[in-house]
Image (spheres, rainbow, N blue to C red):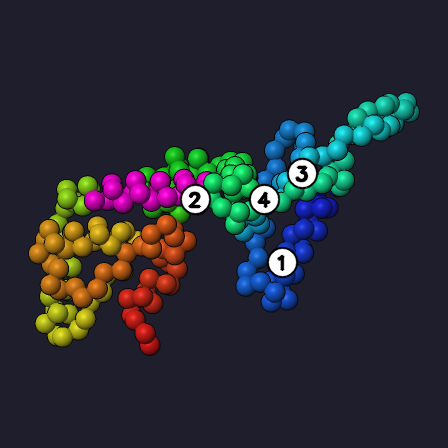
């Protein structure tokens, strides 16, 4: 029954995309081995629908004998809606934040499983707005310290910048690091005069980092 319902929901979500009602549809399912006491739907990381399974008396037949049991009836669950749009400090927003963390229980494993701080930042919004902002702020501060002890520019980089500058071409640096970090690096190595624009990652928008094209478009300017 659970598999059937899951397939039905997945097919319905994909149909929304096929019909052009949404630009993109993706369904992710989490299953654990414990008895299901509730159902939880998380929509676009902003809205959650939660409901407890009603417990009803029932009879099942085992080895030819009728046995009275208490059954969990998921189909009869009443769903309650919570939304981030209710305000960051609202109970609804806190419910959604907790739902995000419960739904993606592997979030912590993802963070501990990488030594790339940007790969920690990418899934941070799944932990809620407060967690996302804290990760961003901590990363920006760490970048500011690390850039001061970073090594020299990679081989050929300075020559390429000088050649572009000498030819009259404009140069923009597009980075998933913060713009402040990049500007500090240029200043420390006396390269700031060779670069016309620096586009760093958008604050508190890890989904906009490369390979998303937005930062490239910002660097190129209006068509």
Q: Main secondary structure of the magenta part?
A: helix
The local crowd at label 2, few if under 14, some if 14 to 19, many if 20 or more residues have their Cα within 10 Å, is some
Pinpoint residue 190: horizontal percent, then vertical percent: 8, 56
Left or right placement of residue 132 versus residue 84 in this view: left
Q: Residue at x 40, y 43 (%)?
A: 132
Instruction: Determine contact: label 4, label 3, CB under 8 Å.
Output: no
User: Above or below — where is 171 with respect to 11?
Assistant: below
According to the picture, the residue beneath numbered tag 4 turns out to be: 82
Q: Which mark is residue 129?
A: 2
Q: Which quadrant of the figure contains the C terminus?
A: bottom left
Mark before the other along the chain sequence, 2 or 3: 3
- Distance from Cα at disc 1 to Cα at disc 4: 24 Å
Mark before the other along the chain sequence, 2 or 4: 4
Q: Is residue 95 visible?
A: yes
Is 166 within the magenta?
no
Pinpoint residue 177: horizontal percent, then vertical percent: 27, 51
According to the picture, the residue beneath numbered tag 1 turns out to be: 14
The secondary element bearing badge 1 is classed as: helix
Per the rendered image, the range of residues in magenta is: 123-144
Q: Nearer the viewer, residue 205 or 23?
A: 205
The secondary element bearing badge 3 is classed as: strand
């Amino acid at each position: 029954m659970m598999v059937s319902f899951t397939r039905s929901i997945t097919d319905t979500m994909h149909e929304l995309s096929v019909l052009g009602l949404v630009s993109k549809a993706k369904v992710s399912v989490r299953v654990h081995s414990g008895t299901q006491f509730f159902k939880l739907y998380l929509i676009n990381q902003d809205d959650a629908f939660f409901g407890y399974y009603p417990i009803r008396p029932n009879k099942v037949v085992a080895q030819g004998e009728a046995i009275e049991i208490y059954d969990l009836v998921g189909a009869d669950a009443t769903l309650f809606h919570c939304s981030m749009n209710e305000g960051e400090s609202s109970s609804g927003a806190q419910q959604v934040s907790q739902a995000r963390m419960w739904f993606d229980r592997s979030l912590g494993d993802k963070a501990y499983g990488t030594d790339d701080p940007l790969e920690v930042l990418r899934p941070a919004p799944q932990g809620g707005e407060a967690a996302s902002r804290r990760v961003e702020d901590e990363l920006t501060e760490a970048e500011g310290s690390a850039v001061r002890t970073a090594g020299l520019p990679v081989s050929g980089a300075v020559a390429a910048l000088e050649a572009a500058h000498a030819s009259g071409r404009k140069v923009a640096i597009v980075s998933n690091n913060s713009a402040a970090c990049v500007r500090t690096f240029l200043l420390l190595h006396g390269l700031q005069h060779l670069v016309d624009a620096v586009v760093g990652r958008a604050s508190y928008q890890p989904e906009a980092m490369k390979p998303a094209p937005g930062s490239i478009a910002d660097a190129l300017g209006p068509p």
